Amino acid sequence: MTAELMRSTTDADTVHPSPTADTRGRGLHDLRISVTDRCNFRCVYCMPKEIFGRDHAFLPQEHLLSFEEIVRVTRAGIANGVRKLRLTGGEPLLRRDIEQLVGMLSRLRTADGHPLDIAMTTNGTALAHKAASLRAAGLSRLTVSLDSLDDEVFRRMNDIDFPVARVLDGISAAQAAGFASIKVNTVVKRGVNDHDVLSIAEHFRGTGITVRFIEFMDVGTTNGWNLEEVTPSVEVIARIDAVHPLEPLPARYPGETATRWRYRDGAGEIGVISSVSAPFCGSCGRARVSADGKLFTCLFASGGHDLRALLRAGCSDAALEASLAGIWSARGDRYSELRSAMGSDSSSRQGERVEMSYIGG
Ligand code: SAM
Ligand code: SF4
Ligand code: SF4
């Protein structure tokens, strides 16, 4: 362990607050760090096989932020207001010794001294044997992506013929490990899995697991996005409500991505993430860090700010915090609102954009 790391994880890490607002008055609350750009799945809406083939050049190991560097970036985020951290990817469970990183991060405290809320989004393929060790390392919340319960559809969507039963086993292992919160993410693609919405909702009704149905988004440039393939959240809600009546719930905090609904009979809740039909840029306080240490202030940004270069040039914690503050205070992103204003013209999108597997979902 380096001296820097010893310091960063043994001081109980109560970092003093210096909340930073962007040009639209949005604070930085939520940091999502991609720990690898690699994935064992080739989900059709994220890493299509034709583009991410056998010879695809993923980042070399030395380009990835080290665990010590991830801890430093997180500390700088906390100093600028971050209260929630999400580890993502690519597939985060492919990163070797990920439990060790979770353990290091779990010792950090928010600016007002609370334990940092650490979540992870995973495809669940390695959960059956990793859930207990992740929980023991201090992971607070888990989101598992699951697009269909129909094995054939699931295998087609992950495009590596992976059986849905093994992801369901992973979710059971997470329940047994005692996670305080488990969520399921379902990306709904019209004509592909929109007919599965009700069965997924019913499978998790009454289990304490909240399913969040996500509108298929135009992230990156390789997933062949088309507005016709988006199933709007109102349709998802209507389909479930017709069988199991729902009522809306208020947001738990400003900037919550999902709109919440509860079953009127008390069997739990579901959420919808309507980034296409009802953009929520107005309250977006999320920053993303790619596996090679670039900071992106919007999921749809074309370029990032190279934090790794700063870290490896020996910058101090104070300089890193100031750099983050400078980047965030210049931020004016509101891509989804602009896409919405473009209407159907939005399918003819211009310019370079990073892929979700690189920037982190
Ligand atoms: N591999 C992990 C997983 O799938 O859970 C974490 C990374 S993945 C990029 C994070 C989330 O982004 C997943 O829930 C995935 O379904 C979602 N996602 C990926 N591409 C998407 C798209 N085009 N539209 C909407 N959600 C997408
Ligand atoms: Fe991999 Fe997650 Fe993208 Fe699917 S959504 S290809 S599991 S990174
Ligand atoms: Fe935030 Fe950008 Fe998504 Fe808008 S489009 S909600 S600013 S990440």
Image: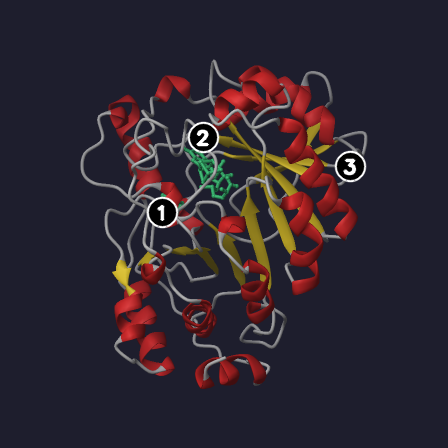
Give the percent coordinates (x, y) of residue 346: 27, 27
Question: Which residue occupies the extreme left position in the image?
Answer: 351
Q: Nearer the viewer, residue 25 or 69?
A: 69
Q: Position of residue 264 (x, y in %)?
A: 77, 30
**What is the x, y in percent for residue 211?**
64, 35
Q: Position of residue 33 (x, y in %)?
A: 44, 57
Query: How far is disc 3 from disc 2 in space, using C-alphas?
Result: 26 Å
The number of callouts visible is 3
The numbered mark, 2 or 1, whose residue comes first in the sequence reads: 2
Residue at image coords 66%, 25%: 200
- Residue 42, numbered circle: none
Q: Which residue is mark 2?
A: 43
- Identify the element where label 1 is drawn: helix
Residue linked to disc 1: 358
Q: Residues within 10 Å of mark 3 (few under 14, many from 20)?
A: few
**Amino acid at the residue labelled 3:** Thr
The reply to whether the residue tagged 3 has its Cβ within 8 angstroms of ligand 1 is no
Residue reaching furthest front?
55
- Residue at 41%, 19% in the rendered image: 229
Tell me: 338 left or right of 152.
left
Q: Amino acid at mark 2?
A: Cys
Q: CA distance from mark 1 to mark 3?
A: 32 Å
* Discs 1/3, front: 1
Query: Which residue is labeled 3 in the image?
Result: 207
